[in-house]
Amino acid sequence: MAVENILKELHIHYSELQLGIVTLDTALKPDQRKLLQEKLQNIGFQLIDDKNTRIIEKIKLLIIAYVRQPYNFLNKNLSDILTDNLHVEYSSLSALFSSITAISIEKYTIYQKIEYIKELLIYDELSLAEIADKLNYSSAAYLSNQFKKNTGLTPTQFKNLKNPTALRHTLDQIQ
C-alpha cells in the first residue's frame, strides 16, 4: 500500500503491483525516477534497475512463497522451482545469489523459515508438530534443533519470552 500511495502521489501509472514488483505503463523520466527512488528509500525500499538484482529479488520472492505456501509446491525441490520459474540453471542462480547477498539460497531459505516459525509461535494457533508439518519439516524435533541453532532459543523458550515480537525480523530485513 505504501508503494501504491507513492505511485499515485507521483502520478506514475502502473499495470501491476505485487510484493516486490511493479510493472509500469510507461518508462520513467529521469526526474520521476529520482523522486521515486528518494520516496521509496524513505520507507525502506529501493528501486531496482540492474538485471542481477532483479533476479535476486525474484529468487527471494519465490523462496518466501515456497516457505509460506508450501502446499503450492508439493513434491518439488526449491532448486527445481527456481529453475522452472526463472529459466536459469540452479548452479548459476546459486552462485549469483551468494555473490550478491553473501549467503547461500539454502541459508536464506532457513532464515525465512525461522522467521515464519516465530510468527506462528507468536500467534499460538498451531502446535509445534503442526508447524513442522505445515513447513514440511521431517519432524518437530528437527524443526526445534534448527530453530535453536539459528536463534539460540528453543521454540518453547521463544514462545515464553515477554516480548517475542522484538526478536522478529521483517521479510526485507532477512539477509
Image (cartoon, grey):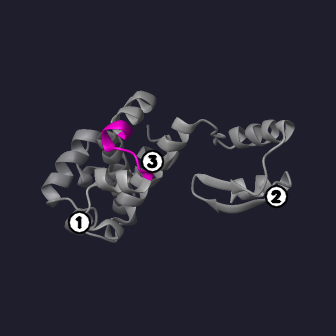
- Pointer 1 or 2: first along the chain: 2
Mark 3 or 1 closer to N-term?
Answer: 3
In this view, 102 is above or below 155: above
> Which residue is identified by label 1?
75
In reply to whether residue 87 is colored magenta, the answer given is: yes
Residue under numbered circle 2: 8
Q: Secondary structure at mark 1?
A: loop
Callout 3 secondary element? helix
Mark number displayed over residue 60: 3
Indicate whether 122 appears above or below 31: below
Q: Amino acid at mark 3?
A: Lys
Q: Tell me if label 3 and label 2 are in contact, CB under 8 Å.
A: no
**Which quadrant: the N terminus?**
bottom right
Q: CA distance from mark 3 to mark 1?
A: 20 Å
How many tags in the picture?
Answer: 3
Percent position (x, y) of residue 124? Answer: 34, 67
| Residue 39 appears in view | yes
> Residue at (34%, 47%) from the top-left corner?
109
Which label was assigned to residue 172? none
Q: Which residues are magenta?
A: 86-93
* Residue closest to the eye, 70 or 87: 87
Mark 2 Cα within 10 Å, few/some/many (few <14, many 20+)?
few
Name the residue at 22% across, 67% down. 133
Cα–Cα gap, marks 1 and 2? 41 Å
Residue visible at 26% across and 44% down? 153
